[in-house]
Amino acid sequence: MMERGGYDDSMMSNSNNGNGKEIVVGREVKGEGKIVQDDIIDIIIGELSSTRVVDTQTYIAEVQARMWKALKRGMHFQALTRSSEEFLKRHLNSKVKLVVLYADMVGSTRLSRMLPVERLAVIMQAFTQEMSFIALNFNGLVLKYVGDAVIAYFPAMHNLLLAADDAVNCAIAMIEVLRQGINPVLLQYDYPELAMKVSMDVGEHSVIQYGSDKSMDVDIVGYGISMAAKIHALAESNSIVISHNVYNVLHPNMQDRFKQLSLDISKWGYTDEDNGELYKVYMYKP
């Protein structure tokens, strides 16, 4: 079973609420209250291919198989944003509390100088798709893709503690899948190993649509997504950085893994909009 705040024997569609009970995507499990509303579950299930619970090694093997196939035959990229679009349209012109997560590849500029465009495209597409799968399997929704980054979010309107826990476990799983699932295949093709950075923050976000046409993109605007992008620059290779807003609602066992960053106020001028104090950031390297 997966330890709270860890990534161990049951990653696919599975988390742990600290009481030894599984939280499986697509089912309501009693524990710390209702985890996600039925509408959120329904739209996530619609995008996931299944709701299996598998052990870590089985999932890693599946990732490696997909990587082999992509590198041998090319990549058919599937943008996994439909569930996010459905969720946001249900909350259009309103405010929702979300934990926002940024995950991107480190060194993509260097890769672009080393590899032919078609090879680079396959690797970037495979990376973003695998990170998207993981976000969905931890009750997240994929907002959009920006370059080599995946931006996802975790609805926190009903249970902020669970949303933050899901987001951090998702980030840990992403780094683990990169290390054990993606990089070993790249090395066998004599490609350089990949690294990544993950950042996250939480806050109220306004859901807006550009233009009056219903087919136009729906997006979110808020302090959380803005600060998640800003603290991303503080992350080291294969690390996770979180704001104090996320840190404060994590289980103490998980808090122990994060260390507060010592920030130079002359270079880091961001303050908490609630109390005006310097914005605190914490980092963990799995």
Image: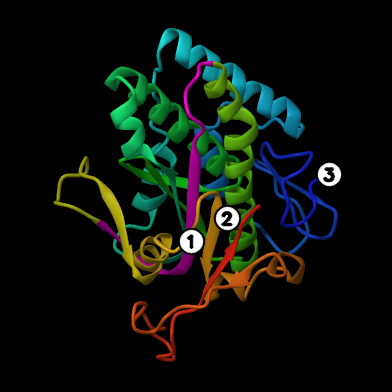
Side (left or right) of 169 relative to 115: right
Tell me the distance, in whole angstroms, between the alpha carbons under discs 1 and 3: 25 Å
Q: Residue furthest top?
A: 73
Give the vertical position of 20 relative to 118 (above or below): below
- Residue 85 visible to the viewer: yes
Q: Which contiguous range is marked in magenta?
A: 189-208
Say which label, 2 or 1, has the lower sequence index: 2
Dot 2 and dot 1 residues touching (CB under 8 Å): yes
Q: Position of residue 270 (x, y in %)?
A: 36, 79
Q: Position of residue 165 (x, y in %)?
A: 64, 60
Residue that carries the numbered disc 1 in the rendered image: 200
* Residue at 47% across, 23% down: 191
How many C-alpha atoms fall within 10 Å of the one at disc 3: few (<14), some, or many (≥20)? some
Tell me the distance, in whole angstroms, between the alpha carbons under discs 3 and 2: 18 Å
Residue nearest the observer in this picture, 277 or 223:
277
Instruction: Reply yes or no: does residue 195 show up in magenta.
Output: yes
Give the vertical position of 191 relative to 84 (above or below): above
Say which label, 1 or 3, has the lower sequence index: 3
* Residue at 47% across, 46% down: 141
Q: Main secondary structure of the magenta part?
A: strand
Residue that carries the numbered disc 3 in the rendered image: 1
- Specify the amino acid type for callout 3: Met
Instruction: Reply yes or no: does residue 116 show up in magenta.
Output: no
Which numbered tag is attached to residue 167? 2
* Residue at 67% across, 36% down: 12
> Element type at marker 2?
helix
Q: Position of residue 115 (x, y in %)?
A: 33, 23
